[in-house]
Protein backbone atom coordinates (compact mmCIF):
# COMPACT_ATOMS: atom_id res chain seq x y z
CA UNK A 1 0.00 0.00 0.00
CA UNK A 2 1.43 3.35 -1.01
CA UNK A 3 1.96 6.15 1.48
CA UNK A 4 -0.69 8.27 -0.23
CA UNK A 5 -3.20 5.41 -0.04
CA UNK A 6 -2.43 4.85 3.66
CA UNK A 7 -2.78 8.53 4.53
CA UNK A 8 -5.92 9.08 2.45
CA UNK A 9 -7.59 5.66 2.74
CA UNK A 10 -10.89 7.40 3.49
CA UNK A 11 -10.78 10.74 1.65
CA UNK A 12 -14.36 11.69 2.54
CA UNK A 13 -13.51 11.26 6.23
CA UNK A 14 -10.37 13.38 5.79
CA UNK A 15 -12.44 16.18 4.26
CA UNK A 16 -15.16 15.94 6.93
CA UNK A 17 -12.64 16.11 9.80
CA UNK A 18 -10.89 19.09 8.22
CA UNK A 19 -14.16 20.92 7.50
CA UNK A 20 -15.49 20.33 11.02
CA UNK A 21 -12.23 21.52 12.56
CA UNK A 22 -12.19 24.70 10.49
CA UNK A 23 -15.88 25.31 11.16
CA UNK A 24 -15.48 24.89 14.92
CA UNK A 25 -12.20 26.79 15.27
CA UNK A 26 -12.31 29.46 12.60
CA UNK A 27 -10.81 29.75 9.16
CA UNK A 28 -7.41 31.22 10.08
CA UNK A 29 -4.38 29.82 8.28
CA UNK A 30 -3.09 28.17 11.46
CA UNK A 31 -6.39 26.44 12.20
CA UNK A 32 -6.70 25.29 8.60
CA UNK A 33 -3.22 23.75 8.71
CA UNK A 34 -3.83 22.14 12.09
CA UNK A 35 -7.14 20.79 10.80
CA UNK A 36 -5.36 19.34 7.76
CA UNK A 37 -2.79 17.61 9.97
CA UNK A 38 -5.52 16.17 12.19
CA UNK A 39 -7.58 15.14 9.16
CA UNK A 40 -4.62 13.11 7.89
CA UNK A 41 -3.23 11.74 11.16
CA UNK A 42 -6.42 10.73 13.00
CA UNK A 43 -7.86 8.38 10.34
CA UNK A 44 -4.40 6.91 9.71
CA UNK A 45 -3.89 6.18 13.43
CA UNK A 46 -7.39 4.81 13.95
CA UNK A 47 -7.44 2.68 10.77
CA UNK A 48 -6.57 -0.61 12.57
CA UNK A 49 -9.67 -0.24 14.74
CA UNK A 50 -12.13 0.12 11.84
CA UNK A 51 -13.42 -2.90 9.98
CA UNK A 52 -13.27 -2.66 6.23
CA UNK A 53 -16.77 -1.72 5.10
CA UNK A 54 -18.10 -3.55 2.08
CA UNK A 55 -17.98 -1.77 -1.25
CA UNK A 56 -20.94 0.27 -2.40
CA UNK A 57 -22.11 -1.56 -5.51
CA UNK A 58 -25.16 0.58 -6.32
CA UNK A 59 -24.48 4.28 -5.53
CA UNK A 60 -27.75 5.51 -7.05
CA UNK A 61 -29.70 3.16 -4.79
CA UNK A 62 -27.69 4.62 -1.89
CA UNK A 63 -28.76 8.13 -2.88
CA UNK A 64 -32.38 6.98 -3.12
CA UNK A 65 -32.10 5.37 0.34
CA UNK A 66 -30.68 8.63 1.71
CA UNK A 67 -33.65 10.56 0.28
CA UNK A 68 -36.12 8.02 1.74
CA UNK A 69 -34.35 8.17 5.10
CA UNK A 70 -34.35 11.99 5.21
CA UNK A 71 -38.05 12.04 4.27
CA UNK A 72 -38.82 9.46 6.97
CA UNK A 73 -36.95 11.54 9.57
CA UNK A 74 -39.07 14.61 8.77
CA UNK A 75 -42.34 12.65 8.74
CA UNK A 76 -41.42 10.72 11.91
CA UNK A 77 -40.51 13.95 13.74
CA UNK A 78 -43.95 15.34 13.00
CA UNK A 79 -45.61 12.08 14.01
CA UNK A 80 -43.68 11.81 17.27
CA UNK A 81 -44.45 15.44 18.13
CA UNK A 82 -48.15 14.84 17.48
CA UNK A 83 -48.19 11.68 19.59
CA UNK A 84 -46.20 13.14 22.49
CA UNK A 85 -48.26 16.33 22.61
CA UNK A 86 -51.47 14.31 22.53
CA UNK A 87 -52.80 12.03 25.24
CA UNK A 88 -49.95 9.78 26.35
CA UNK A 89 -52.43 7.04 27.17
CA UNK A 90 -52.88 6.46 23.43
CA UNK A 91 -49.22 5.51 22.94
CA UNK A 92 -48.53 1.82 22.36
CA UNK A 93 -44.80 1.34 22.93
CA UNK A 94 -43.45 -2.06 21.94
CA UNK A 95 -40.32 -4.14 21.58
CA UNK A 96 -40.22 -5.73 18.14
CA UNK A 97 -37.89 -8.41 16.80
CA UNK A 98 -37.07 -7.76 13.15
CA UNK A 99 -35.63 -10.85 11.42
CA UNK A 100 -32.54 -9.90 9.41
CA UNK A 101 -31.62 -11.15 5.97
CA UNK A 102 -28.28 -9.31 6.24
CA UNK A 103 -25.28 -11.27 7.46
CA UNK A 104 -22.60 -8.62 6.92
CA UNK A 105 -21.97 -7.00 10.37
CA UNK A 106 -21.22 -3.53 8.94
CA UNK A 107 -24.46 -3.46 6.92
CA UNK A 108 -26.49 -4.77 9.89
CA UNK A 109 -24.99 -2.02 12.05
CA UNK A 110 -25.85 0.53 9.39
CA UNK A 111 -29.46 -0.72 9.42
CA UNK A 112 -29.56 -0.42 13.22
CA UNK A 113 -28.22 3.14 12.97
CA UNK A 114 -30.82 4.12 10.39
CA UNK A 115 -33.60 2.74 12.60
CA UNK A 116 -32.21 4.55 15.64
CA UNK A 117 -31.90 7.87 13.82
CA UNK A 118 -35.52 7.73 12.72
CA UNK A 119 -37.57 9.38 15.49
CA UNK A 120 -39.92 7.07 17.34
CA UNK A 121 -37.72 3.98 16.96
CA UNK A 122 -34.49 2.83 18.59
CA UNK A 123 -32.52 -0.26 17.72
CA UNK A 124 -31.57 -1.91 20.98
CA UNK A 125 -29.46 -4.83 19.89
CA UNK A 126 -28.39 -6.79 16.85
CA UNK A 127 -28.57 -10.46 17.77
CA UNK A 128 -26.17 -12.02 15.26
CA UNK A 129 -26.69 -15.57 16.54
CA UNK A 130 -30.44 -15.44 15.81
CA UNK A 131 -30.22 -12.80 13.02
CA UNK A 132 -32.57 -10.37 14.75
CA UNK A 133 -32.67 -6.62 15.17
CA UNK A 134 -34.38 -5.69 18.44
CA UNK A 135 -36.26 -2.41 18.02
CA UNK A 136 -38.14 -0.32 20.56
CA UNK A 137 -40.86 1.76 18.95
CA UNK A 138 -42.81 4.56 20.60
CA UNK A 139 -46.16 3.73 19.03
CA UNK A 140 -46.86 0.39 17.32
CA UNK A 141 -50.28 -0.47 16.02
CA UNK A 142 -49.18 -3.58 14.10
CA UNK A 143 -45.87 -5.37 14.78
CA UNK A 144 -45.89 -7.08 11.38
CA UNK A 145 -46.40 -3.75 9.62
CA UNK A 146 -43.40 -2.21 11.42
CA UNK A 147 -41.27 -5.21 10.46
CA UNK A 148 -42.39 -5.00 6.82
CA UNK A 149 -41.66 -1.26 6.76
CA UNK A 150 -38.12 -1.63 8.14
CA UNK A 151 -37.34 -4.49 5.79
CA UNK A 152 -38.78 -2.82 2.68
CA UNK A 153 -37.64 0.78 3.25
CA UNK A 154 -34.20 0.16 4.73
CA UNK A 155 -33.00 -3.46 4.70
CA UNK A 156 -33.82 -4.27 1.06
CA UNK A 157 -32.05 -1.15 -0.31
CA UNK A 158 -29.04 -1.83 1.95
CA UNK A 159 -28.82 -5.37 0.58
CA UNK A 160 -28.94 -3.97 -2.94
CA UNK A 161 -26.40 -1.20 -2.23
CA UNK A 162 -23.81 -3.56 -0.75
CA UNK A 163 -24.71 -6.70 -2.71
CA UNK A 164 -25.28 -8.90 0.31
Image: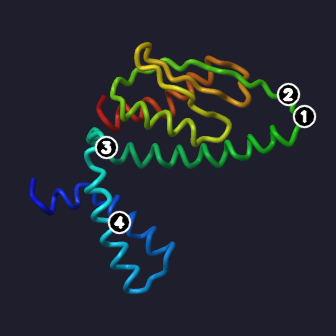
Q: Nearer the viewer, mark 1 or mark 4?
A: 4
Q: Earlier in the sequence, mark 1 or mark 4?
A: 4
Read off the residue under disc 1.
Answer: 87
Single out the residue that lies furthest toward the top.
Answer: 130
Read off the residue under disc 4.
Answer: 15
Single out the residue that lies furthest toward the left.
Answer: 2
For the residues marked 4 and 3, what is the alpha-carbon distance in whole angstroms?
18 Å
Q: Residues within 10 Å of mark 2 (few under 14, many from 20)?
A: few
Percent position of residue 39, x then y: 33, 65
Is there CB contact under 8 Å for labels 1 and 2? yes
Q: Is residue 119 above or below residue 39?
A: above
Read off the residue under disc 2.
Answer: 90
Left or right: 87, with 63 as reference point: right
For residue 50, the mark is 3
Q: Earlier in the sequence, mark 4 or mark 3?
A: 4
Residue occupying image coordinates x 49% and y 74%: 23
For the residues marked 1 and 3, what is the alpha-carbon distance in whole angstroms?
44 Å
Amino acid sequence: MTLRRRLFAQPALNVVIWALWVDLNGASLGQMLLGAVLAIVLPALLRPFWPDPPLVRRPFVAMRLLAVFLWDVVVANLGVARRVLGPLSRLRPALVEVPLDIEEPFVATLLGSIVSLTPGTVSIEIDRTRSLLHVHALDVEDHADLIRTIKARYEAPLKEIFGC
